[in-house]
């Protein structure tokens, strides 16, 4: 890859640092797909991608990387191909899975980028990164607004700022503009580069509003009563996990998978390596993701196909 135009701006040494950095991206939706693309185009060669979803028609409005012909394919699979099309030397490690306390070690890297749309995963990433002294960047976009915040091991953590906030909502329930996700992604990658090359990363919480054309910097502080900053990492032990975990404001529910499932209940299922998809269910190694309008509906589907 010819990176001369960027090297003129950041310098040769900084460029080398980017090429050697290992970056994990959690969530390959609107934010994650563009973030991954911008990083590979910037010369980043070691990426870890984690996502549990298939490409749907409603994704194409904002997820640049995906085409109509990709609908139904796992996002990480298409993303890897796309990124290697930009730079075939980029080492892209993919996990088609849900990130949880059992597999959280897969994000071990120099920098973790949160591109999810759920608070539960962000709190989990916060616990892991705080414990292991890894820097990470929170990003979110909803309607016409978005946030980016660099979480450093010593500064205010995600829990310090957002502990009392359950969820700001999801794109599925409130909608989002593709201009916002693109801008938030660009800000996040810009901060990621600053962190990797060690050049004044932002300390404040960044807030963007495209209706008013505002970009605000909000001062944040360590919270004295923050349990994570006091060394209590309860989410790493699965603390707070329910039998049916509501992941996306009532649209996705996660269940533990029993050791054996009745294969005859899944005739015609589509296989993707060790993962298979059947109707509204994605069956992973140790968990099952069910898309449903309510917990009751999800539990009914679980009982019908898996048993009680
Ligand atoms: Zn904290």
Image (cartoon, rainbow, N blue to C red):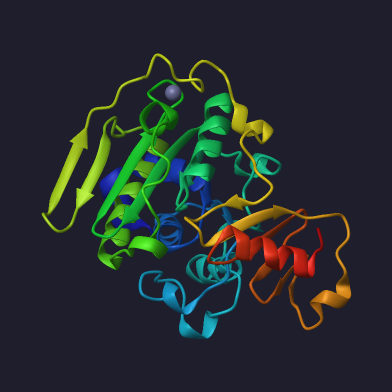
The image quadrant where one finds ligand 1 is top left
Give the residue furthest to the left.
212
Quadrant location of the N terminus in the rendered image = bottom left
Count of numbered badges drawn on the protein? 0
- Left/right placement of residue 230 relative to residue 64 reads right
Q: Position of residue 54 (x, y in %)?
A: 58, 70
- Left/right placement of residue 221 relative to residue 18 reads left
Asked if residue 38 shows in the view, the reply is yes
Q: Residue at x 64, y 45 (%)?
A: 100
Q: Is 191 above or below relative to 307?
A: above
Front one among 242 and 172: 242
Q: Residue at x 17, y 46 (%)?
A: 215
Q: Is 215 above or below relative to 85?
A: above
> Which image quarter: residue 144?
bottom left
Q: Residue at x 44, y 45 (%)?
A: 18
Asked if residue 290 shows in the view, the reply is no
Q: Position of residue 21 (x, y in %)?
A: 51, 43
Q: Position of residue 37 (x, y in %)?
A: 43, 62
Q: Is 279 above or below relative to 7?
A: below
Q: Residue at x 61, y 61 (%)?
A: 296
Q: Is 301 above or below relative to 145?
A: below
- Left/right placement of residue 170 relative to residue 111 reads left
> Which image quarter: residue 204?
top left
């Amino acid at each position: 890859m010819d990176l001369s135009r960027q090297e003129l701006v950041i310098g040769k040494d900084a460029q080398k640092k980017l090429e050697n950095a290992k970056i994990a991206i959690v969530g390959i939706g609107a934010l994650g797909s563009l973030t991954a693309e911008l990083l590979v185009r910037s010369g980043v060669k070691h990426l870890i991608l984690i996502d549990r979803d298939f490409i749907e028609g409603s994704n194409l409005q904002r997820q640049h990387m995906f085409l109509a012909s990709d609908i139904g394919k796992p996002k990480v699979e298409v993303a890897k191909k796309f990124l290697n099309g930009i730079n075939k030397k980029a080492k892209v490690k993919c996990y088609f899975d849900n990130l949880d306390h059992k597999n959280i070690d897969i994000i071990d890297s120099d920098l973790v980028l949160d591109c999810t749309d759920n608070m539960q995963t962000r709190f989990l990433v916060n616990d892991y990164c705080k414990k292991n002294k890894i820097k990470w960047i929170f990003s979110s976009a909803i309607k016409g607004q978005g946030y980016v915040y660099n979480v450093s091991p010593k500064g205010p953590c995600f829990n310090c700022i957002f502990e009392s906030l359950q969820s700001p909502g999801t794109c599925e329930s409130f909608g989002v503009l593709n201009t916002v996700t693109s801008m938030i992604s660009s800000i996040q990658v810009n901060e990621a580069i600053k962190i990797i090359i060690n050049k004044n990363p932002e300390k404040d919480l960044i807030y963007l509003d495209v209706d008013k054309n505002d970009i605000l910097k909000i001062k944040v502080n360590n919270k004295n009563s923050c349990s994570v900053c006091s060394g209590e990492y309860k989410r790493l032990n699965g603390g707070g996990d329910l039998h049916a975990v509501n992941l996306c404001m009532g649209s996705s529910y996660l269940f533990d998978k029993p050791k054996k499932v009745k294969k005859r209940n899944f005739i015609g299922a589509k296989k993707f390596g060790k993962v298979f998809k059947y109707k509204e269910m994605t069956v992973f190694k140790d968990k099952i993701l069910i898309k449903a309008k309510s917990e009751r509906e999800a539990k009914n589907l679980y009982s019908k196909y898996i048993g009680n």
